[in-house]
Image (tube, helix red, strand yellow):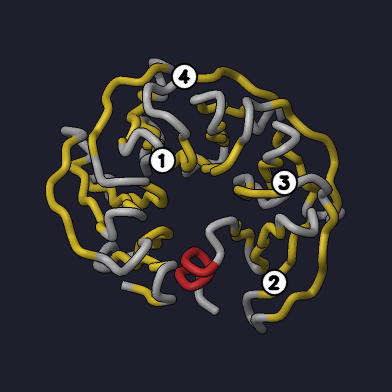
């Protein structure tokens, strides 16, 4: 199974070669998948309701949001067990990682905020409130200077300047924006609007909508090909990929 397929099939999936880690909300666990054989090789108990997940840059730690308990679970991948937690806002969802692995961004829906975790210190460094309601995903640009946040109930994309630690723009997109992806060069971003069945193309410098592309029903997850030539969108309403 390719990294692209994993990203589309399992939005709550994190990759730390040679394994992928998939959150299981109902059982409070993580499935460990060997990406060479596409088989589940272990199950890690986290408790709670694990949602978003991102691996640290050194491959030692996995950061998993626990929605009902308002925390970020720290999973030691070498020991394969939960090893501590960091308090977050109310109802945390998506978790993103900076390209250098230094920072983790966790979006909390009911707090309308994004928490930034310093992985060197394993603690929250700061929190940014966003204007849009119900932020779900928080994704770093490739250069780490900007974080895009999809606000499901606001139908907007919130733009955070990382150095300024503040929201600097808001982009109106379609109904219920979900997954976000950047081109490798950071020039454009793509956001899937689930209730609009549309992929929005964003100028990541001007923070403005460039184009709208029809997707399938309930477009959700996004994966970008490493060479930047293709964007893949999972369509939950019709079990397809655009």
Q: Nearer the viewer, mark 3 or mark 4?
A: 4
| Mark drawn on residue 194 | none
Q: Nearer the viewer, mark 4 or mark 2?
A: 4
Give the CA distance from mark 1 to mark 2.
30 Å
Q: Does residue 184 appear in the picture of this structure?
A: no
Query: Could you tell me if the residues under marks 3 and 2 are in contact, i.e. CB atoms within 8 Å?
Result: no
Q: Nearer the viewer, mark 1 or mark 2?
A: 1
Q: Nearer the viewer, residue 36 or 29?
A: 29
Residue at 24%, 42% in the rendered image: 173
Q: Which residue is mark 3?
A: 61
Q: Is residue 212 left or right of residue 231?
A: left
Residue at 82%, 69% in the rendered image: 42
Residue extending furthest toward the bottom? 37
Comes first in the chain, label 1 or label 3: 3
Give the CA distance from mark 3 to mark 4.
26 Å
| Mark drawn on residue 129 | 4
Badge 3: few (under 14), some or many (20 or more) residues near its Cα, within 10 Å? Answer: many
Q: Which residue is mark 2?
A: 33
Query: Could you tell me if the residues under marks 1 and 2 are in contact, i.e. CB atoms within 8 Å?
Result: no
Residue at 63%, 75% in the rendered image: 35
Give coordinates of residue 49: x percent, y percent: 73, 48
Comes first in the chain, label 1 or label 2: 2
Give coordinates of residue 215: x percent, y percent: 26, 66
Q: Which residue is mark 1?
A: 152
Residue at 80%, 59% in the rendered image: 27
């Amino acid at each position: 199974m390719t990294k692209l397929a994993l990203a589309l099939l399992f939005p709550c999936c994190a990759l730390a070669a040679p394994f992928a880690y998939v959150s299981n909300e109902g059982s409070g666990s993580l499935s460990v998948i060997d990406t060479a054989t596409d088989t589940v090789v272990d199950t890690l108990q986290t408790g709670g309701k694990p949602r978003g997940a991102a691996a640290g840059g050194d491959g030692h730690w996995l950061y998993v949001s626990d929605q009902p308990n308002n925390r970020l679970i720290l999973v030691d991948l070498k020991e394969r067990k939960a090893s501590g937690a960091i308090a977050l806002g109310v109802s945390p969802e998506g978790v993103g990682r900076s390209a250098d692995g230094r920072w983790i961004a966790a979006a909390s829906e009911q707090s309308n905020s994004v928490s930034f975790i310093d992985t060197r210190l394993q603690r929250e460094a700061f929190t940014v409130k966003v204007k849009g309601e119900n932020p779900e995903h928080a994704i770093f640009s490739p250069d780490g200077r900007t974080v895009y946040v999809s606000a499901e109930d606001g139908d907007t994309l919130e733009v955070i300047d990382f150095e300024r630690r503040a929201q600097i723009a808001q982009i109106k997109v379609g109904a219920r924006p979900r997954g976000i992806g950047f081109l490798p060069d950071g020039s454009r971003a793509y956001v899937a609007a689930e209730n609009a069945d549309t992929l929005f193309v964003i100028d990541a410098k001007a923070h403005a909508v460039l184009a709208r592309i029809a997707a399938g029903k309930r477009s959700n997850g996004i994966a970008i090909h490493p060479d930047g030539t293709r964007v893949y969108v999972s369509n939950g309403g019709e079990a397809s990929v655009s």
